[in-house]
Amino acid sequence: PVHGKIPFNMYDYQEELVRMYQANRFNIILSARQTGKTETSCAFLLWYAIFQPERTVLIASNKSSNAMELIAKIQFAYEELPAWLKPGIDDINWNKHTCAFDNKSRIVSTTTSKDSGRGLAISLIYCDELAFVKPHVQDEFWDSILPTLSTGGSMIITSTPNGDSNLFAKLWFA
């Protein structure tokens, strides 16, 4: 925050995080705050959408403002890419909740709810701060998203610690 725009040079653990995202269909990340997990994840989601045509990425976050912040980070990263690496964008679907590219891939953000992702053919789900979503909403979200996962979709769940009586904790300790 005090240095403004800085180069994105990853630490070894961030590179390992990206390798895990690439190698595993399901990832559950428990992380301390201020580790660069969010920026690394946003960079991965942007890479995925650019290099995987006709994919839909769903970002489900505990708050609408957090979901919009993730899209803003992705859009900022896109804008900083060299011109030769940038795909074209879909201006109609480039806003506070969506990034859409001319390769027909898109990244959509929403709050985590029982209706998150309904009606979308989701290739990758990124759940941000799942441990901070109310337990009954976590359960409803999980029930609604399972059909997408059963058809081959991938999932990344991230959170900072928040007790052990919620779905995130149950998945983490399973």
Image (spheres, rainbow, N blue to C red):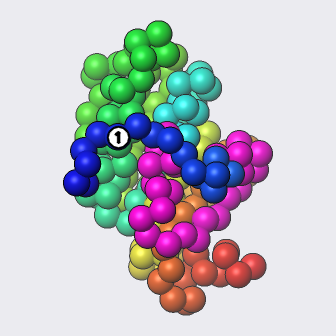
Left or right, residue 55 beside residue 23 = left
The residue range painted magenta reads 17-43
Please state which of residues 86 and 131 is positioned toward the viewer in this rendering.
Answer: 86
**Dividing the picture into quarters, in which one does residue 77 lie?**
top left
Give the structural element (helix, strand or loop) at label 1: loop
Depicted 31 relative to depicted 154: above or below: below
Corner quadrant of residue 73: top left
From the image, tell me which residue sits under label 1: 6
Instruction: Give percent across and percent down for residue 28.
Output: 64, 64
Q: Position of residue 148 (x, y in %)?
A: 64, 49
Q: Quick check: is 113 in the magenta stretch? A: no
Q: Residues within 10 Å of mark 1 (few under 14, many from 20)?
A: few
- Name the residue: 32% across, 58% down: 66
Residue 57 in view here: no
Query: Which residue is at 40% across, 60% downward?
Result: 61
Q: Residue 128, image x and y in percent?
A: 46, 61
Q: Which quarter of the image is occupied by the N terminus?
A: bottom left
Q: Residue at x 36, y 26 (%)?
A: 80
Taking the view exactly as shown, the residue that stands out farthest to the front is 3
Specify whether 11 is left or right of 75: right
Q: Is residue 68 above or below residue 170?
A: above
